[in-house]
Structures are given as C-alpha cells and as structure tokens.
Amino acid sequence: MKILAIGRNYVEHIRELNNEKPSEPVIFTKPDTAILRKNNPFYYPDFSKNIHYEVELVIKINQKGKKIREQFAHKYYDEIGIGIDFTARDLQQTAKEKGLPWELAKGFDGSAPISDFQDISNFKNLKDLNFSLLIDGEIRQKGNTGHMLFPFDHIISYTSNFFTLKKGDLIFTGTPAGVGPVKIGQKLEAYIEDEKLLECEIK
Ligand code: MG
C-alpha cells in the first residue's frame, strides 16, 4: 500500500505558513513504514528539533482505479479515519529554500499515526464534517471539510491521473490552521465530530 498526502488544502493553514494558494492539490507521499497504528507512541527523532503536528482526515481507498472521473470518485472509498502528518518543519524549511523534495521532512518512521477507519455511513455529511486535535486536553486545531480547497472527490480524481490507486491506499487530505511543535511527554488526541479516534503520546 502507499500513502499519498495533500499539502495546502485549507486557506487559513496556507496563510499561517506564508505559502501560495495552489491551483491544483500539492501532493507528496510517505512510505508504509511511516504508519503508526493502535495508538502507539511517537518517538521524537534525533534529526529534527522542530517536529510539528498536523491533524488530517484520511481516506482509505477500497478498489483499484486510474484516471477516475470526479463524478465517480465517491465509489472509491467507503471508510475514513483521522491521522497526524508529523512534519520535521526544520528539514522542510531547508528543503523549501533549496527547492528540494520533502520526503525526509514528511516520510520518516512514525510520521503517520492513523486511527481505525469508520464507515462513511456513520457521518451525516462528508462535506460538513468537523475534526479536531487536542494536546494535553487543550484544543489546538479545528477543521471542517467545508473549508477544503480540494474536496475528497477532487483529490481522488486528480491523484489518480498520476498514481494508480489500489485497495488499502491511504490519502491524508490536508491540515487546517493551528499547526505547531510537539514536545516529549505530550499527549495528542484526535477527534472526528465528538468521537475520539486516535491518541498518540510523544516519547
Ligand atoms: Mg499535512
């Protein structure tokens, strides 16, 4: 399986990092070794001094597809979850300045904690879905899918022009405003609506 991820999908987050608003989704990938499941802890890596949290909704692809038209994209997922796109912001800043790729900043071991996946029929309206991140009980990020520049179906259609999507592939769909650094000892909790689906301790 592969993990695709979308950068710059929420306007307020684009502003906070002084990035340009893209005309098509910004795509990067993480290897499968990035995944952390079952609320396992995240071990702060020694190559970064500025690991940031980014809470994101995650789509799980349910069948193979290529060049999927947007109007049919909804047939390619029936489960979503929540995850954290841990980012070594210091490495990413250096890469951005030099025009280099982001893999080391985004794809390192443990950089993709994910929850169990939920059937989308559990949610009233995927186009108006709230999600949030708490750190040590304090709210840090709040998102709503209504504020995405590129909604789920556009992301699936667009990415499938470049990558054949396969059953089990995951797509991180971008983070809302409020990103920031994590510290050893903190506990992160991620929610979709009022349900806590993911916990992650920083060790
Ligand atoms: Mg992200």
Image: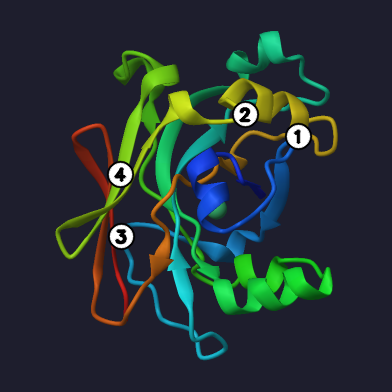
Which is more toward the observer, 19 or 179? 19
* Circle 1: residue type: Glu
Where, by quadrant of the figure, is residue 31 drawn?
bottom right
Residue mark closest to the camera, 3 vs 4: 4
Q: Residues within 10 Å of mark 4 (few under 14, many from 20)?
A: many
Which sits earlier in the primary sequence, circle 3 or circle 1?
A: 1
Q: Which mark is residue 24?
A: 1
Image position, residue 62 (x, y; %): 58, 27
Q: Is residue 103 above or below residue 159?
A: below
Which sits earlier in the primary sequence, circle 4 or circle 2?
A: 4
Q: Are marks 4 and 2 in contact (CB under 8 Å)?
A: no
Q: Which mark is residue 39?
A: 3
Where, by quadrant of the figure, is residue 26 drawn?
top right
Which is more toward the observer, 49 or 86? 49
Which sits earlier in the primary sequence, circle 2 or circle 1?
A: 1
Which sits earlier in the primary sequence, circle 3 or circle 4?
A: 3
SS for callout 4:
strand
